[in-house]
Amino acid sequence: MSTLLSKKYVFSKGIDQYFTGIHDAYKFTLLFFKEVTKRPFHFREVVHQSFEVGIKSLALISLTGFIVGIVFTKQSRPSLEDFGATSWLPSLIGIAIVKALGPLVTALICAGKVGSGIGAEIGSMKVTEQIDAMEVSAINPFKYLVVTRVVATTITIPILALYCSFVALYGSYLNVHTEETSSIISFYQNAFKSISFLDIFSALARSVVYGFTIGIVGCYKGYNAIQGTRGVGKAANQAVVLAMFLVFIEEIIIVQIVNWIRFF
Amino acid sequence: MDKQKLHSINYNESVISINGLYKAFGDLEVLKGIDFNLFKGENVAVLGKSGTGKSVLIKILIGLLKPDKGEVIVLGKNVEELDRKNLDALRLRIGFSFQNSALYDSMDVYQNLAFPLTMNVKNLSRKEVDNAVEEALDAVGIIDKIHEMPSELSGGQRKRIGIARTLILKPEIMLYDEPTSGLDPVTSTEINKLINEVQELYNTSSIIITHDLTCAKNTSNRTAILLDGRFMKVGRFDDVFDTDDAQLKGFFNYNFIQ
């Protein structure tokens, strides 16, 4: 029998790969926490990557946040009108956007734009031996490529989420303003009246977790890319799918934790 | 051209010593007991067909791959016993030229060369970095491409820049992985000449992984034939192929010598 056919697996090829993949991802994440505290810190590269993640995503985040604000207001108004409660519109929009939609929409957009970019860039560096070239030049590629990008996404995505919420509220205000005369200050005051410090803190904490997840998943998939250019495309694609999936799982868990804290 | 006359070699000082080296990937045994010494100032070409483990061998030498069994001593250090810090210190003394050059796509030629220097040598002034980059580019004869991106360079130019990037750290040992693969005969001849110039100028000892007999003949002081995971024959190029062995004859006849 050929060596390929005689290869032994504990369960099957797919199941074995699934579990070794989880183990590898776990080790990859642990390595990040080990390396992030060690010198050198590559501050300049962190700033560069933050620019790549933050500034270059601003246009897309602005457009999406603005549209979400308008659409959500348009969809909510008829329901509130039925109860004669349109004055609650700013509060409803504030709660929905700041607590839920802002962080989630930002995370999903960044998973698509930033996560795929990181997966493709690092994957391309892997298959063209650029990562090995760093290694043989006595440069720690994990620290230079992975740590800097994950730190950048973890810092930048919460800022983008806050920005997205403000833009969405502005979109909502413009929509409200077309129907009834109201000042932007009173709209924002009403919107934030129903939001507690815990709400803003939990929104930021969630964004930090999403940012970390998007960065680490993109880097992990890119760093483990194989099979040449086909592997690069696969890494970028898997980075997006896995990051989005994990963001939704984290959303459920964090909301449960925040509700539990609120209860006590 | 008699390569033996080009350079003085110290046959009493071994810079790389390999003893009983084994490496397998799953069930596939690639290296099956390699014993070899590279002497100071010497260029050795390792010849062999594709997939015989030539690149695996030099990746083990620089610590990119771990051997399954055996000992690899480079510049007096056992590579497998080194921690990250000491391995990096050793790597600074070795230049590795990749088969596909492995230039950083997002950086121009200047940044490609300055990057390993500034990451490893602290507190260099801009002027010192500029001088080092210009010196390395001058050595490979391609200084006019300093502000171009890797995507704008030809295959031969990329090879030269890849070699210049290793020279900027003034290595004692050079490891060339298929330096002439994918190049036309004229450019290949230029790269062969460059390998000899690097040996002269930087007093390096080199291992040249190749399946190009012309490259082996023109750049090596000794040639080693890697077949079935072992060095089948090591010696001067002409002596290695002065044989009745059918396998060696077959390999020799398969290739074209200029």
Image: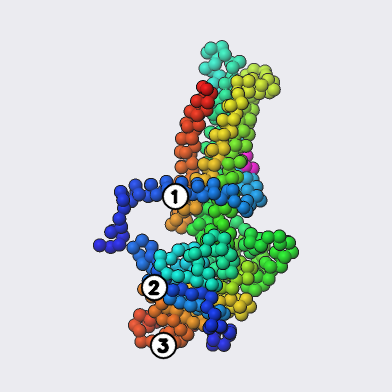
Please identify the quarter of the rendering in which residue B129 is found.
bottom right
In terms of secondary structure, what is the magenta stretch mainly?
Answer: helix
Q: Is residue B94 shown above or below A97? A: below
Disc 3 designates what residue? B242
SS at badge 2: strand
Span shown in magenta? A54-58
Q: Which residue is painted at 45% across and 63% down in the image?
A: B66
For residue B33, the mark is: 2
Which of the two discs, 3 and 2, sits closer to the camera? Answer: 2
Question: Which of the marked residues, 3 or 2, is nearer the chain's N terminus?
Answer: 2
Depth check, front residue: B89 or A77: B89
How far is the residue under mark 2 from the one under mark 1? Answer: 31 Å
Q: Are marks 3 and 2 in contact (CB under 8 Å)?
A: no
Chain of the residue on which disc 1 is drawn: A
For residue A24, the mark is: 1
For residue B98, the mark is: none
> Would residue B76 be visible to someone looking at this image?
yes
Please identify the quarter of the rendering in which residue B30 is found.
bottom left
